[in-house]
Image: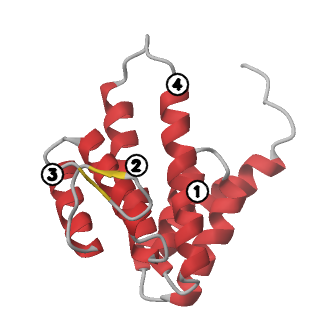
Amino acid sequence: MTDEQNDQGMELKFNLANLDAYISLSEKSASEGRNAESINMMREGVDRFPDEAKGQYAMAMALMSGLKADLARDVLWESLSDEESLAERAQDALQAAIGLDPNMWQAYRSLGTLLAVRGRIRKALEVWRESLVLNPDQPDLEQDIKMYAERENSDSTDDEVPPRQ
C-alpha cells in the first residue's frame, strides 16, 4: 500500500485499482476483525468511486460490521455516541446506495434491519416491504416482517401496563 494522492489532492492510503478490489479487501479485513481498516478502506473506495451504489452498500456493511463488533464488546464505560455515529453513517451510506440504485433490494433490506435495531420498527417494516417488492424470494425476511408487525400491533394496542398481581 502506498500513500499517493488522487486528482482531487486526497491522500490515498490503499490506492487500489478499482472498487471491487476495495470491497474485497474491506470484507477480508472485517472478517479478520480489523473493522477500522475495513471502514477506512471503503471510505477511500467511496471517495474515489462515489457514483457506485455497490460502494455505498459495501461502506454501510463495513460500518455495520464495526457497529456489531462494538456492541459485542458491550463496554459499558465507553460512550454510546460512537455506536450511534456508526449507525448514522451506515444509514446514510445505505440511503446513498438506494439513491444511486433504487433496485438494490439488499440495501433496502439492510436499511430495514438497521432501522429495526435502532427501534424504528414502523419505518423498518416499510423499508423491508420495499425490499420484498424488489426481490420476493426472501422467506426469512417475510418471517421477520410478520414477527415485527405482530409485535408492533400488540405494542400499539397496549395503552397501559397491566397491574401486578
Which residue is pictured at 32% across the width and 32% down the height? 72
Viewer-nearest of discs 1 and 3: 3
Q: Residue at x 52, y 72 (%)?
A: 97
Question: In front: 48, or 108?
Answer: 48
Q: Nearer the viewer, residue 154 or 88?
A: 88
Name the residue nearer the viewer: 139 or 31: 31
Q: Amino acid at mark 3?
A: Thr
Q: Position of residue 135 (x, y in %)?
A: 48, 88
Checking the image for residue 162, the label placed there is: none
Secondary structure beneath dot 3 equals loop
Q: Which residue shows up at 49% across the image and 29% down it?
A: 82
Q: CA distance from mark 3 to mark 4?
A: 34 Å
- The residue that appears at 80% across and 50% down in the rendered structure is 156
Are discs 2 and 3 less than 8 Å apart at CB?
Answer: no
With 112 as the anchor, is 110 left or right in this view?
left
Q: Which residue was labeled with disc 1?
A: 92
Residue 69 as seen in the image, left or right of residue 78: left
The first of marks 2 and 1 along the sequence is 2
Q: Which residue matches tag 3?
A: 2
Q: Which mark is residue 80?
A: 4
Kindly identify which residue carries mark 2: 63
When asked about the image quadrant of residue 23, the answer is: bottom left
Which quadrant of the figure contains the C terminus?
Answer: top right
- Nearer-the-camera pick, 96 or 116: 96
Asked if the residues shown at circle 3 and circle 4 are in contact, with their CB atoms under 8 angstroms apart, the answer is no
Please tell me which of labels 2 and 4 falls first in the chain. Answer: 2
Q: Nearer the viewer, mark 4 or mark 1?
A: 1
Please name the amino acid that badge 4 sits on.
Leu
Tag nearer the camera, 2 or 4: 2
